Image (cartoon, rainbow, N blue to C red):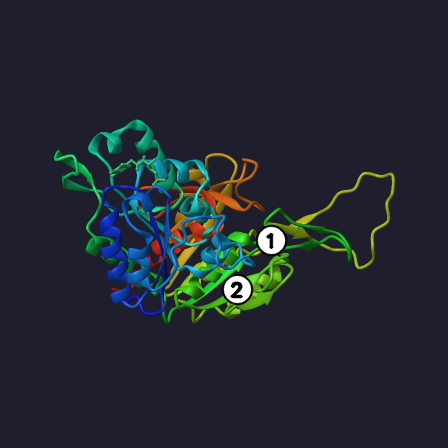
Amino acid sequence: MLEGKHILLGVSSSVACYKAVELARLFQKAGAEVRVIMTKNAANLVQPLQFEAVTGNPVYCDIFNCRAPWEVEHVAMAKWGDVFVVAPATSNILAKMAAGIADDAPTTLYPAFPHTTFVAPAMHTEMWLHPATQDNIAILQKRGVRFVGPETGELASGDVGIGRMAEPEHILEAVMDFFAQELSLKGRCVLVTAGPTQEAIDPVRFISNRSSGKMGYAIAEEAVRRGAEVTLVSGPTLLPDPPGVTTIRVRTALEMHREALARAEKPDIFIFAAAVSDYRPEKPSEKKMKKTPEKMTLRLAPNPDIARDIGRKARPDQVLVGFSAETHNIEQSARKKMKEKHFDLIVANDVSSEGIGMGAELNAVVLLSPGGKPEKMGPAPKKFLASRILDKVAEVMNKKKM
Ligand SMILES: Cc1cc2nc3c(=O)[nH]c(=O)nc-3n(C[C@H](O)[C@H](O)[C@H](O)COP(=O)(O)O)c2cc1C
């Protein structure tokens, strides 16, 4: 199950450290390659050599003592890993991860790592239940960090309660489930629209919006990573074509409409992440318009609605996912849009705050499905959200195809 996977195993100084050696062995046995990153405190409890013997790789413990001085170790490691698993995770490391403190090897790796992070906390019940720990857990969960355990049972102190690190087999299972889910779109065909559109006023001027295309591109990339065949119909963006994705560049809403509808037969999933201009100048000038002291009126014609037109012709087994960028009444407007356009899922986001949403690196969204509870995600990097959104899309698709 883990053949060819690269696992970064972060170890902090809980009494459960010794179980991490067993976990490293299980990962190896399942076919993964493992590299261990320890806190200095953890190295007081378990010899790094133990991990080196099991994994066959050097342990990364001291950020200033790199074996390959030409590489910045935490960055090189972050690029190498497919998943980062912190087990055991002390209350201290959870706090540092939540706050973004990077003062040792695992906590420096964490913010540099672009993919999924798991944590398996281990601590005494009082520490686990303390509001400081619970607040940090909430922050990490909101950011997309996945928790395995803790379990209830006998603790190192002899007390019985919640706080035991999840058994290594359970952590292995969670990571294997994650990679299985990773292939959740294998063999599926996905069409994503992304970016803004530009509606010409004259040969040099246009109406557009602030969409950067980053969210749609992140979804297209993540869908490829999960084994899908992906077509991206993109408005003008500064982003390079995502590797492995068939990218069709368009400029206007009419072009995007034409290209998307021409490909509407095959996809299992449509993701309408583009910020399509609702209107276009009715009669764009063929020549550059001259400045005059007069007021100017621009007559606008409505653009076709790509999602609605695809939705009208969609087969019952095709999954339609909409986006709804709003500045107020976010959930209400998104639900209305979902109903009108027969979406199976809608990703609503508030674009009124600076630093999140349109054009930004981060996004905060609410996922809504007909009759389903709203699921809040973020603020988090768009790549993280792309992965969480596709988890949900795969779930909806599997239900539809059953
Ligand atoms: C023997 C021993 C066992 C410990 N076990 C735990 C534990 O299970 N969970 C925890 O949160 N802290 C535990 N601690 C406390 C942490 O080691 C301490 O908070 C340390 O500063 C954490 O550093 P680190 O997160 O950088 O590894 C233990 C300390 C000792 C000496």
238 or 328: which is nearer to us?
238
**Relative vertical location of residue 273 with respect to residue 348 in this rendering, above or below:** below
- Is tag 2's residue or tag 1's residue first in the polypeptide sequence? 1
Q: Amino acid at mark 2?
A: Leu
For the point 20% across and 56% down, the residue is 169
Q: Residues within 10 Å of mark 1 (few under 14, many from 20)?
A: many
Give percent across and percent down for residue 167: 19, 51
Residue closest to the eye, 98 or 348: 98
Which quadrant would residue 69 be assigned to in this image? Answer: bottom right
Establish if 220 lies above or below 96: below
Mark 1, residue position: 196
Task: Residue 234 in the image: state x and y as whole percent.
Answer: 57, 61
Mark 1 residue's CB less than 8 Å from ligand 1: no
As drawn, is 26 to the left or to the right of 182?
Answer: left
Image quarter of residue 358: top right
Q: Amino acid under label 1?
A: Pro
Label 2, on which residue? 232
Q: Quadrant of residue 312?
A: bottom left
Task: Determine if residue 219 is in view.
Answer: yes
